[in-house]
Image (cartoon, helix red, strand yellow):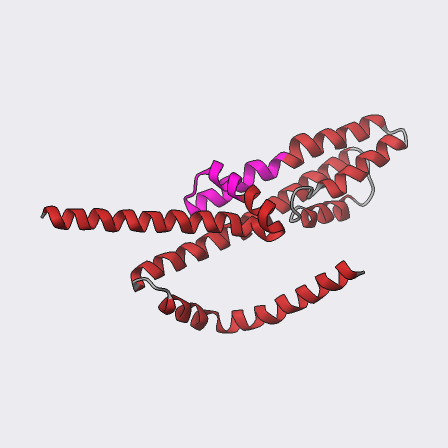
């Protein structure tokens, strides 16, 4: 009960804050960029990098969820499970949860099939869940996020897993975001040093 209340409260606060961020987002972002202790062009680069990574990670999470839900629905249809569309939708939503994700849906389904004597059906769901549905996140997310952010695929995977371990569900966005901002700052510093060196040599 306490967990449900905390979730509802947090969700309500997020909606309330989200309204003002959507309404005043541009002015808030502009004020934040002006307040950063950097030159405006550097602040603009970091702000653009921030938006790119957040959009890419959210888009990647949605696409991965839809793919995992579709694969789950197809698997359940093959083995003759009822309500495959509902189970696929639940799996797509569960894919946002860290660590276990879609296994919340296909795991109990496989156990139920095995327990009721549907051996090959349970084995199919189990194999599909581990080898296909479970691997989609590890394969698609680095490709989708890395393509838009310019961060290497392996680094997206490592920072996503590290972000989940440190921050929970929000680490899906925070992990790659920290990595992207670090790489952007590193790139800006390198370009400045190269420009200073070229000016001294001239």
Residue in view at x 72 percent, y 29 percent: 127
Q: Residue furthest left?
A: 202
**169 is higher (above) or lower (below) than 39:** above
Question: Is 21 situated left or right of 116 in this image?
Answer: left
Which quadrant would residue 13 be assigned to in this image? bottom right
Front residue of this view, candidates 112 and 99? 99
Chief secondary structure of the magenta span?
Answer: helix
Q: Write down the region rendered in magenta.
A: 135-159
Residue in view at x 62 percent, y 71 percent: 16
**76 is higher (above) or lower (below) than 194:** above
Which quadrant would residue 110 be assigned to in this image? top right
Is 147 inside the magenta-drawn segment? Answer: yes
The percent position of residue 51, horizontal first and vertical second, equals 45, 57
Front residue of this view, candidates 171 and 102? 171
The percent position of residue 194, horizontal first and vertical second, equals 22, 46
Residue in view at x 52 percent, y 39 percent: 158
The percent position of residue 104, horizontal first and vertical second, equals 75, 43
**25 is higher (above) or lower (below) than 139:** below
Question: Is 4 situated left or right of 38 in this image?
Answer: right
Q: Residue furthest right?
A: 116
Is 106 inside the magenta-drawn segment? Answer: no
Front residue of this view, candidates 99 and 62? 99
Which quadrant would residue 112 be assigned to in this image? top right
Q: How many marks?
A: 0
């Amino acid at each position: 009960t306490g967990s449900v209340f905390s979730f509802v409260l947090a969700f309500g606060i997020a909606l309330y804050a989200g309204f003002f961020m959507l309404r005043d987002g541009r002015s808030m972002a502009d004020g934040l960029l002006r307040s950063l202790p950097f030159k405006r062009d550097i602040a603009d680069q970091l702000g653009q990098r921030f938006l790119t990574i957040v959009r890419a990670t959210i888009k990647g999470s949605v696409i991965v969820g839809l793919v995992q839900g579709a694969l789950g629905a197809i698997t359940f249809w093959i083995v003759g499970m009822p309500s495959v569309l509902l189970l696929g939708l639940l799996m797509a939503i569960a894919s946002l949860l860290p660590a276990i994700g879609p296994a919340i849906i296909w795991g109990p389904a496989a156990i139920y099939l095995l327990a009721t004597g549907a051996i090959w059906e349970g084995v199919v769901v189990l194999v599909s869940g581990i080898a296909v549905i479970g691997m989609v996140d590890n394969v698609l997310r680095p490709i989708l996020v890395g393509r838009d952010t310019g961060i290497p695929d392996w680094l997206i995977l490592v920072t996503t897993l590290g972000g989940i371990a440190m921050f929970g569900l929000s680490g899906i966005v925070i992990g790659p975001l920290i990595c992207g901002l670090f790489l952007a700052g590193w790139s800006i510093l390198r370009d400045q040093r190269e420009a200073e060196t070229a000016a001294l040599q001239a």
